[in-house]
Every structure is written in structure tokens, then in C-alpha cells.
Amino acid sequence: MSLYGTGELIEGLRGVRENTIKIAEDIPEERYWYRPTPESRSVEELLLHIIASFQASQRLHGTERVRSYEQYDFAALLKRVPVQEGDRRSKAEILALLRGESARFSQWLASLPESQLAETVQMPAGATPAVKNRFELLLAAKEHEMHHRAQLMVLERLLGIVPHITMPIGKLDDLAVEDWERMVDVNIKGVLWGIAAALPIFRRQKSGHFITIASTAAKRTVPTMAVYSGTKAAVAAIMDAFGRRLRANFAQPPSSPGTPRPISQAMCATKTFARSWKSRARRSRWRLEQSLQRSRMRSISRME
């Protein structure tokens, strides 16, 4: 049986770091200061935090070889590593650190004997499980970077940058089959899995909202975005048909006096349908204004 071991962890770490580096390259240096809220980390701080976390992990399980997390001062540990989250670094320096620290960490990890990786570490009181081995905790370092990489992708979106992971650009005849599979998995299957997870709950409570995001690419295509446009058109079609089905099945049941009136509706809102929603809203406002005008005219007639 082939199990997930040190070699697989090193390859996984390299893959995660390559994507982190690509994100760091795609964000312009003049936007490294950007933070969505005052209490959030900036792009620069997030990247430096990732580097510092790996340095801390190496010190924790290599230099110090800690055997218990009980009352361990992790804040003090982060102050002892060479790279600090609050440092001011250029984009070129950060990219060099991301590459260099990844190589050093992988080399160090490959040198660890199995006996050291199997050593157990006591977790803080109340943690489940109460004990983990070093290999599990080093695996957590990769997961920690993936967590912050997801935050960086959100920042890219807020900056108007399309993350390279979510929308590979290329002509259809490039035959980037793996990219197609990933895009279909995320953009189409992700929506379907979300529906499958939530719909039973909505049925039980007789209410619920499905909100999905399509794209103008569903209607306006370019040669380098054929698969992306196809997935977004699929989302629009799925939600349109699904919304019609839900509205037909989730009828408003009768309510008894003194009981809350249940709300049963499916809201399938996509960017693609935004224009139709706005049009309906304008018509509703026009009808309301006409009704008010007629009421005012009737009141004037009575006064006369």
C-alpha cells in the first residue's frame, strides 16, 4: 500500500508554494499595501506571514524539537524568526524569500529521519486529538499556507485581478485538459454540490436562497476563454431552470392566524440576470408611482 509520506508532502508543499508565488507575481507591487479592512493583513503582510510561519515551523520541530504545546508562547516564537510580518520588503525581495525559504524547508524536511517525524507532541488542553506526531504538524504548515493563499485570491478579486487558478487563459486547441477539468469542477460541479448540500435543508424549513455568480463571459466570449465562458453559461442555465422548478414546487402554504407566515422562495440571482431584475424593479416603481398618482387625483376630486 502506498501511503502519504515525506516525499509526497514535499511535492505538495512545492505545488502550493508555486501557486503562492504566481499570485505574488500577479499582484502589482504598488498594490502590496492593500488591505480590505483596517484590521486585516495587507498583501505584503500576508506573504511575509507565510514565510515567517514556515521558519517558525522549522524552528519548532527542528531546532527546539518541542514535545508539548501546553502553554507554549507562539507569539514569542514568531518574534525569534528572521522574517517578521511587519517588515518592509520590496516585491522582488518577497519573491526571492518565497522561493528560497521553500527550497530550504523542503531540503530540511527531506533530511528528517522517520523516528523524528513519528515523535508525538502534546496538544493544548481541550484539543482533539490530545496528541499529534510531528509529521501531522508539518503537514499543517502546508494547510496553513493554503488557507492564506485563499485569502490572497480574495484580495486579487477585490483588486480586480482574476486569480490564475480559477481562470486559465488559453485557446481551446492548446488542449489544456487538466485546466478544463479543474474549471468544470469548480465552476459547475461546485454549484451543483452546493445545491445538493443545501436543498434538503431548504425543503425541510420550506425556505431558502441560492445565490450564484455567473459572468458576462456567459454571453460575450473571446477565443482564449472558451471553457470559462462555457462554465459560466452552464451556471446561468442551471440556475434559470432550477429556479423555475423551485418556484413551482415551493408553493406558499396556508398560514393560521397567530402563527408566523413562512417565506418560501428561491432567489437565483446571477450577474447575467441583473439587467432583468433591474428592469422589473423599474416597472414596479412605475406602477407604484402611477397608483399613488391616481390616489392623489381621487383625493383632490373628493375635496372639490
Image: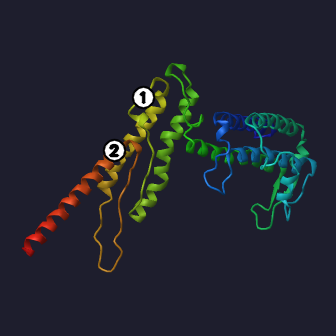
Q: Quick one: SS at disc 2? A: helix
- Mark yes or no: residue 1 visible: no
Q: Quick one: SS at disc 1? A: loop
User: What residue lies at 85% left-to-right and 65% top-to-bottom?
Assistant: 71
> Within 10 angstroms of label 1, few (less than 14), some, or many (20 or more) residues?
some
Q: Nearer the viewer, residue 299 or 160?
A: 299
User: How far across and down, in percent of the image, does residue 68 sit?
Assistant: 87, 60
User: How far across and down, in percent of the image, does residue 108 sit?
Assistant: 88, 38
What amino acid is found at the position of numbered circle 1 in the picture? Answer: Thr
> Within 10 angstroms of label 2, few (less than 14), some, or many (20 or more) residues?
few
Please report contact status of discs 2 and 1: CB closer than 8 Å, yes or no.
no
Q: How many marks?
A: 2
Q: Give above or below for 168 relative to 195.
A: above
User: How far across and down, in percent of the image, does residue 217 sit?
Assistant: 43, 34
Q: What's the distance in space between the residues labelled 2 and 1, CA to CA?
A: 18 Å
Tell me the residue that label 1 is attached to.
221
